[in-house]
C-alpha cells in the first residue's frame, strides 16, 4: 500500500500546458507574457520603493498599498518560472511536491491579496467617516497586526487543502491544463474520490474571497451613505475620488478570480483556450494593473514616482 502511495503522490510527475493548439507559436506568445511579467515586477517594486523612501507616503493608506504590491510580487514570482519555462524551453514536467508548493504559494498570496483589499476598504471607510480619528485608529501597530493576520489566515486555510491533496492517487492522465498548478485542475486528474477536497477548496474560497467581497461591498455602502450626508458637492467628489483606485484594484482581482472558479466548476464544455485565458488573467491582471491604477489615479503616488524616476536616471 505504501509503495502505491509513493508512486501516486510524492514521485508523480505532472505535465503543464501552455496555450492548447498553439504550441508551435509558444516562442511568439512568450513575448507579451514577458512584457506583462516585466511590467508587474517593475511596477510593484517601484510602488514598494517609493512608499519606503518617501516620508510623505508613510500613512496607513500607502502602507496597505505596499502590502498589496508585496502580494502581487509574490503572485507573479510564483508562476514566472513554470510559465516562461514552457514557452521558452517546453519544460512541461513538474513533480508532485513542486506542484503542491506552487499551489500553496499561489493560494496563499491570493488569500493575502483578498485580505489586504478588505483592509484597504476599511481604511477608506475610516478616512471618510471619521477623519479626525483616522491616525489614532489605524496606528502602525494595528497595520502590522493586520498584515500578520493576512499571512496567518492564508497559511492556516492552506493546511487542510495541502493535507487532503497528499491522499489523492493519480492513475490516469497526468496532463494539467494550465502553465501552473491550480488546485481544481490537479483534482480532476485524480482517480480517488475528491468530493472532500472539492468541498474544502470551495469552503476556503467562500470564507476568504467570498466573505471579504461581502464586507468590501458593505464598507462601500457605508462610505456612500457617509458621502451623501456631506453638504458640499466638491467635498463629495473629493471623498469619492480617494476610492477610485481601490475600486479598480477590487475589480481586477475579483472578476478574474470568480470567473476562473466558475469556469472550472461549471464550464466543462468551454473550449480549452477559455480556461487558459481566464487562468492567466487571474494571475497576471492584478499585478500588472494595480501599479498602473494607483500611479494614474492617486496623485500622491504619481508625484512620488515622478520624483524618484528622474533621480534614478541621473544616477
Image (cartoon, rainbow, N blue to C red):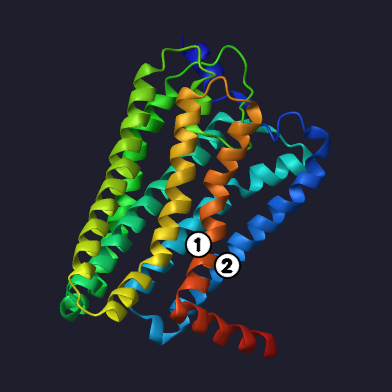
Task: Give how far across and how far down residue 255 sits, in percent.
Answer: 46, 45
Classed neighbour count for the residue bearing mark 1: other residues with Cα under 10 Å, few (<14), some (14–19), many (≥20): many
* Residue 39 left/right relative to 109: right
Task: Give how far across and how far down residue 50 sits, in percent.
Answer: 49, 78
In the rendered image, the quadrant that contains the C terminus is bottom right
* Residue 99 left/right relative to 247: right
| Residue shown at 54% from the left, 16% from the top | 170
Q: Which image quarter: residue 132? A: bottom left
Query: Which of label 1 and label 2 is nearer to you?
Result: 1
| Residue 1 in sight from this viewpoint | yes
Q: Among all residues in the image, which is located at the extreme top? A: 1
| Residue 315 in sight from this viewpoint | no
The disc at residue 43 is 2
| Residue shown at 70% from the left, 46% from the top | 84
Residues at badges 1 and 2 in contact (C-beta under 8 Å)? yes
Q: Which residue is mark 1?
A: 290
Q: Which image quarter: residue 129? A: bottom left
Choose between 274 and 212: the one closer to the eye.
274
| Residue shown at 65% from the left, 32% from the top | 273
The disc at residue 183 is none
Query: Tag 1, which secondary structure?
Result: helix
Amino acid at each position: 500500500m505504501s509503495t502505491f502511495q509513493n508512486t501516486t503522490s510524492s514521485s508523480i510527475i505532472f505535465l503543464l500546458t501552455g496555450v492548447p493548439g498553439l504550441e508551435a507559436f509558444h516562442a511568439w506568445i512568450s513575448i507579451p507574457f514577458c512584457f506583462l511579467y516585466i511590467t508587474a515586477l517593475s511596477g510593484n517594486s517601484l510602488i514598494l520603493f517609493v512608499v519606503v523612501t518617501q516620508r510623505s507616503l508613510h500613512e496607513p493608506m500607502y502602507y496597505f498599498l505596499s502590502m498589496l504590491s508585496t502580494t502581487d510580487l509574490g503572485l507573479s514570482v510564483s508562476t514566472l518560472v513554470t510559465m516562461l519555462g514552457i514557452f521558452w524551453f517546453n519544460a512541461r514536467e513538474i513533480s508532485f511536491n513542486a506542484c503542491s508548493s506552487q499551489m500553496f504559494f499561489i493560494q496563499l498570496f491570493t488569500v493575502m491579496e483578498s485580505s489586504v483589499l478588505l483592509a484597504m476598504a476599511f481604511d477608506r471607510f475610516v478616512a471618510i467617516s471619521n477623519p479626525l480619528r483616522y491616525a489614532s485608529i489605524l496606528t502602525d501597530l494595528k497595520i502590522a497586526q493586520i498584515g500578520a493576520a493576512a499571512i496567518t489566515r492564508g497559511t492556516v486555510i492552506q493546511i487542510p487543502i495541502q493535507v487532503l491533496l497528499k491522499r489523492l492517487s493519480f492513475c490516469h492522465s497526468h496532463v494539467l491544463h494550465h502553465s501552473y498548478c491550480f488546485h481544481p485542475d490537479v483534482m480532476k486528474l485524480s482517480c480517488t474520490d475528491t468530493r472532500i477536497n472539492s468541498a474544502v477548496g470551495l469552503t476556503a474560497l467562500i470564507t476568504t474571497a467570498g466573505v471579504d467581497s461581502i464586507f468590501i461591498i458593505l464598507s462601500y455602502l457605508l462610505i456612500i451613505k457617509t458621502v451623501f450626508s456631506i453638504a458640499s458637492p466638491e467635498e463629495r467628489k473629493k471623498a469619492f475620488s480617494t476610492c477610485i483606485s481601490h475600486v479598480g484594484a477590487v475589480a481586477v482581482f475579483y472578476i478574474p478570480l470568480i470567473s476562473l472558479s466558475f469556469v472550472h466548476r461549471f464550464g466543462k464544455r468551454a473550449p480549452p483556450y477559455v480556461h487558459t485565458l481566464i487562468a492567466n488573467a487571474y494571475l497576471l491582471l492584478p499585478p500588472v494593473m494595480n501599479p498602473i491604477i494607483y500611479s494614474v489615479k492617486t496623485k500622491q503616488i504619481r508625484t512620488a514616482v515622478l520624483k524618484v524616476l528622474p533621480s534614478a536616471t541621473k544616477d
